[in-house]
Amino acid sequence: MPDFDHDDQLLTNAFAGFRDEVTPYVKPAGTAAARATVQHRHKVRAVAASGLAALAIAVPVVAYAAGGAKSNGPPAVPADSPSVVVTTTSPAAPSPDASTTPAAPDGRITKADLGNATFNIPAWPKGFDDGCAKGSVKFASGKASTDSSTRIQGDPVYIDVDHDGAQETVVIVSCSPQGTDYKVLALDRDAQGKIVTLGQVVGSAGSEGQEGKDIETIWGVEAGDNGQVRVDVGEYRPCCDMTQSSQHQWRMYGWNGSAFTQTGGPTAFGPNPNVTDLTVSAEKLTMVATGATAWEGTFKLTIHNAGQFATPGKVEINLIINQTWTVLSTTDCKVQTGNTACQVSSIPAGGSKVVTIKLSAQTQPQLSECTVYVYAVNDQHGVYRSLKDPASTKVQVVQA
């Protein structure tokens, strides 16, 4: 083999060994590195054509390859070598722990705890309710310690009204100074476990409202969908001898972040079948002497139902007469206690009823007139509401 070929083979073997050791530590930088590598190889072959240059280059390289020299790191890269990128992997920085949102306080308050709790009650409507407990109120056995007419009504309802993942307590508080008024309150606990009032869901209008149009009665509450509060409301505030005439109407309320607002259900009350519209008229009452001290007389009374519903109960006729007068008989009207009132059956919408009433007096009548009141009543004699004041008429009294 010619010396030139032998030297060329020595160079080839030497660079192959050098490449094998360096390769694990370097990474060519793309196509530019490949082109530089090819140019470098051509340059090496050109230098090998000169015997002196070949020996000058081959001796140290062969010595390195033959001697099996080892180093503690990759060999130095010549200045004219292709650019390389040395990659190193740094340890990943520890990621901070994800922040944890504290759990919302549990706002469920049992009925027993609620009955002896202290919490804030917003102001009541002006009028009869001025004396109802308000502000920070302490309860004992479900009644306000400062005003026993203010009390917790019914069972609490549990709803997540503020969407914090924990339920709140919704309860009705009522006050009955003369008639009854109501508040629906949402209660919660703070971070220390103290009971706090989140807000008033809705309240009755009391003496400040207009019966038949505003909320005057609250029947009950229940949970709605998506944190809403369903409230059963009515439009009349019963008082004294009046019976409850309100309709049941469900309305929906939701928390907007600062207050409760109505979110669903009716916003007005329609015609009420428990409210009457009666009119009454009467003929003259002619009293005739039947003895030295006895007088009797008969008159006819016409009752008309001008409403769009039949009267919700029986219709009672009440006569305001002298204590010495007595109702002797009636047609189709059952005499009640005291012999000054009688009842007829329910009158259909648009219908009328005529009643004949016979009276007696123990002395010569001194009255020139008497008054008759007509209204619908329930079985306990509670009076239903009327669109106007209770129907009444004056009966003119004459002597024959």
Image: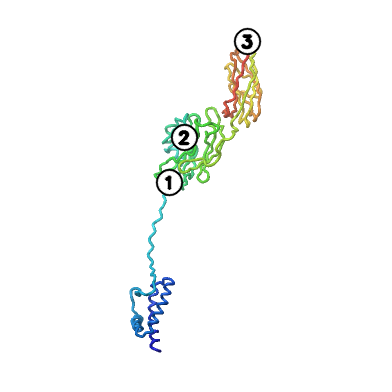
Q: Give coordinates of residue 129: x percent, y percent.
A: 47, 30
Question: Which residue is outermost to the bottom?
Answer: 1
Q: Quadrant of residue 61?
A: bottom left
Q: Residues within 10 Å of mark 2 (few under 14, many from 20)?
A: many
Q: Residue at x 44, y 31 (%)?
A: 147
Question: Distance of mark 2 from mark 3, alpha carbons?
Answer: 61 Å
* Badge 2 element: strand
Q: Position of residue 44 (x, y in %)?
A: 39, 80
Amino acid type of the residue tagged 2 in the rendering: Arg
Looking at the picture, the colour scheme in use is rainbow
Residue to which mark 2 is pinned? 151
**Element type at marker 3?**
loop
Q: Label 3 crowding class (10 Å Cα cut-off): few <14, some 14-19, many 20+?
A: few
Instruction: Decide which of 147, 354 is in the foreground and name it.
Output: 354
Q: Nearer the viewer, mark 3 or mark 1?
A: 1
Mark 3 / mark 1, whichever is N-terminal: 1
Name the quadrant of the C terminus: top right
Circle 3: residue type: Ala
Quick check: 23 above or below 177? below
Task: Compare marks 1 and 2 and give the one earlier in the sequence.
Answer: 1
Tell us which disc is closer to us: 1 or 2.
1
The image quadrant that residue 292 belongs to is top right
Horizontally, residue 38 falls left or right of residue 235, namely left
The residue identified by callout 3 is: 292
Rendered image quadrant of residue 370? top right
Tell whether 227 sits left or right of 303.
Answer: left
The amino acid type of the residue labelled 1 equals Pro
Q: Which residue is mark 1?
A: 105
